[in-house]
Amino acid sequence: MMAVKPKIQLALDYFDLAPALAMVQQVKEEVEVIEIGTPLSKSVGMLAVRTVRELCPDHLILADIKSPDVGGGEAKMAFDAGADWMTVLGAAPLETVRLAWEEAQSRPGKEMFIELTGIRDILGRADQWRAIGVDRMVYHRGWDEGNLSRSWEQRDLETIQHLVEMGFQVSVAGGLGVEMIPFFKGIDISVFIIGRAIRETPNPAGTAREFRKLIDANWVG
Ligand code: 5RP
Ligand code: MG
């Protein structure tokens, strides 16, 4: 049993605002964090962040913009719209990471996360991110690679554990279903990011509660 209980983050990977808002209304009581997914961030922009912020004044909101460049400006954009958290692509130059991190540091309660989609030399780069001061990341099995070729494996657990030991608070994402939660038992997961496994069920709030039960059974906090 670990000392930190992971949060649940609902990922809104929609292309339109209306279904995203309907899902927020159904599930918001069951989760701590609401993510404005990358497709929604692109299609609707920061209006999606502003609107969800109005609906959920007390939730944490993550803008999953996976910023590749102009890190300071994109972080400012997301935070100004009401996001608490935003993501920078792990492939972004270190200058981009540093500028986004500095923007977050300059504002109380704001945080930037490195997003690891597609990054192969994670541990090789992690020291550089830590040297900047970054201490949060999203360990992400990419949507497309998860659908087509890549399953969660023991080596993922080992890498996550290593990152935790380096001082990172690690969120995990990528096709996670309820059955996958015990797989991570024994590791200080900071946040479980869940999208399709909640949204694409007949009873999304009930499914979110199932995730919660498994988290409660495997982590204390
Ligand atoms: C895709 C993402 C998704 O938000 C993330 O993969 C979580 O969604 P799901 O649980 O459906 O995989 O960032 O790039
Ligand atoms: Mg996402």
Image: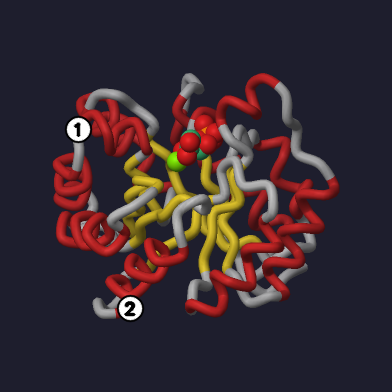
- Tell me the quadrant of the picture where the C terminus can be found: bottom right
Residue topped by disc 2: 105
Does the beta carbon of the residue at mark 1 sit less than 8 Å from ligand 2? Answer: no
Quadrant of ligand 2: it is top left
Using the image as rendered, state which of residue 79 and residue 205 is in the foreground. 79
Residue topped by disc 1: 44
Q: Position of residue 118 (x, y in %)?
A: 60, 41
Q: Are marks 1 and 2 in contact (CB under 8 Å)?
A: no
Q: Residue at x 21, y 62 (%)?
A: 76
Using the image as rendered, state which of residue 124 and residue 213 is in the foreground. 124
Q: Is residue 70 left or right of residue 189?
A: left
Q: Position of residue 23 (x, y in %)?
A: 33, 31
- Secondary structure of the residue carrying tag 2 is helix
| Type of amino acid under label 2 | Gln
Q: Position of residue 33 (x, y in %)?
A: 40, 53
| Type of amino acid under label 1 | Val
